[in-house]
Image (spheres, rainbow, N blue to C red):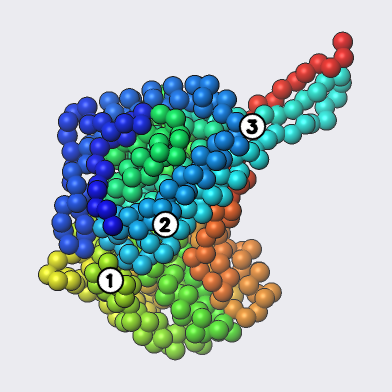
Amino acid sequence: MSSEIRSRLWIHNQWEDAASGETFPTTNPATGETLAHIARGAAADIDRAVVSSREAFESPEWRRMDPHKRGRLLWKLADLIQANADEFGSLETRDNGKPYFESRKIDVPSAISQFRYFAGLADKIYGEVIPVPGPFLNYTLKEPVGVVGAITPWNFPLNIVSWKLAPALACGCTVVLKPAEQTPLTALFLAELAAEAGFPAGVLNVVPGFGTEAGAALVEHAGVDAISFTGSTAVGKQIAASAAGTVKKVSLELGGKSPNIVFADADLKAAVRGASTGIFYGKGEVCAAGSRILVERSIHDDFVEALKARAEGMTVGDPMESTTRLGAIVSEAQLDRVMGYVESGKSEGARLVTGGERVQVDGAGNFLTATVFADVTPEMTIAQEEIFGPVAAVIPFDDIDDAIRIANDTRMGLAAGVWTRDIGKAHRVARELQAGIVWVNSYNMYDAGSPFGGYKESGYGRDLGAQAAIEKYTQTKSVWVAVDG
Ligand code: ADP
């Protein structure tokens, strides 16, 4: 596995230093080792990148590119990710702390499939002919929205970058990407491969840096037409407010506090497995994490025992080890936040069933054991706020109406799970949940073709899915043609 690390700004298909000359370190959270000093992009660099992306957007080479060819470039990029899959997996694990097993077996293949799916969409984006009164031909054109500013988080660095890039490029946009400061490495590698695939200079620029510097400058820049953001609800609100200044099109995929509802008639073994992966997969640093596990009272105690056993079987360790299931929490600051929630659970009267311990592996790193709280009530802090860590809150309920009421009793509405053998009940609950994604007798299923995004304060706009991509990355022009004098 090559260990070359790209650490500079990628602008107009070249590596550049930040205008300020400054850098910031990116570290391996499992060891504390500094992996690289990354160019610290800020407003001047964002401006350079936007000018480059605007020029590319207006150039005939990109604007008039045959959409079949755009599709072929995306397909070629997927091939290049595949050819470098081990390196992507290793970079992601070292930068984020998640098990190599997850990055190499799940994140990288998902990114590849997203580029392949949207490669296929590139030549299937078209308007319609509308029957209007009078001697007119009226038709619509679906035109690319323009320069897209993509701002992405640290939990699925390559994957969420792909969620934004693949559909935006398929629709003919150009992109300035600001990856999360904690995990910029795979985005920078991807940029270089996009050039190798044949994307013209400026179609993709990558400016790593901090949210309040590079991120905020991108949102405010008058040369950016749309912002596609995934991150926290607090930052999403700031972005929506700031983007209003230049009337940008904004899509926000924000936090969640997703309920995973287990009825007494469920396949208990499957439900425990699903609830466990629902919260512990990706260290719980997952916007759709099933962090509130609602369990029907009659099976509550058996369920908690079984979940405890599974949690205790989650091996915490070196993320590069194939047996590791819980890697390192992304940063010390994040681990401190999560520990604050563990303390609040205890002090507000929840019962700590297992976990909640900060540990080190080989004397280093930010690790936390898989944590389960029982006897949680819906108003407790750990049942209301997004923890973004491997902490499950088990809440008992009495009947279907009670379950739906508790499930919807939060300001978030990203995802939800339902476990039951009663098909009618499953569909009723799926309809009544205020969530953008509902998994029935499953959890954490994703596909490039299936839209993902939230209700309520979990955001608006969708990632993935053909329809969602066209809504987000194109705008509609209506053309009237007099056909008869
Ligand atoms: P998390 O809690 O997952 O770190 P954030 O919302 O803080 O989520 O970060 C997600 C992305 O948003 C990161 O790329 C971060 O740099 C960026 N970001 C943070 N603050 C701002 C801001 N004020 N304006 C624009 N982008 C921001």
Residue 168 image position (x, y, % from top left): 51, 39
Task: Check whether the beta carbons of the residues at disc 3 and disc 1 lie within 8 A of each other.
Answer: no
Query: Which type of secondary structure does the marked residue at label 1 adopt?
Result: loop
Instruction: Please tell me which of labels 3 and 1 falls first in the chain.
Output: 3
Disc 1/disc 2 C-alpha distance (Å): 17 Å
Q: Residue 142 — which label?
A: 3
* Image height of 372 relative to 132, above or below: below
Q: Residue 425 at what x, y percent from top left? A: 65, 74
Q: 181 above or below 142?
A: below
Q: Which residue is drawn at 59% across and 39% down?
A: 122
Residue pictured at 49% horizontal, 44% vertical: 76
Q: Is residue 150 above or below residue 323?
A: above
Q: Distance between the residues labelled 3 and 1?
A: 48 Å
- Say left or right for 44 vs 413: left
- Looking at the rendered structure, the kind of residue marked 1 is Glu
Of badges 3 and 2, nearer the viewer stands: 2
Label drawn at residue 321: 1
Q: Is there any visible trace of residue 198 in the rendered image?
A: yes
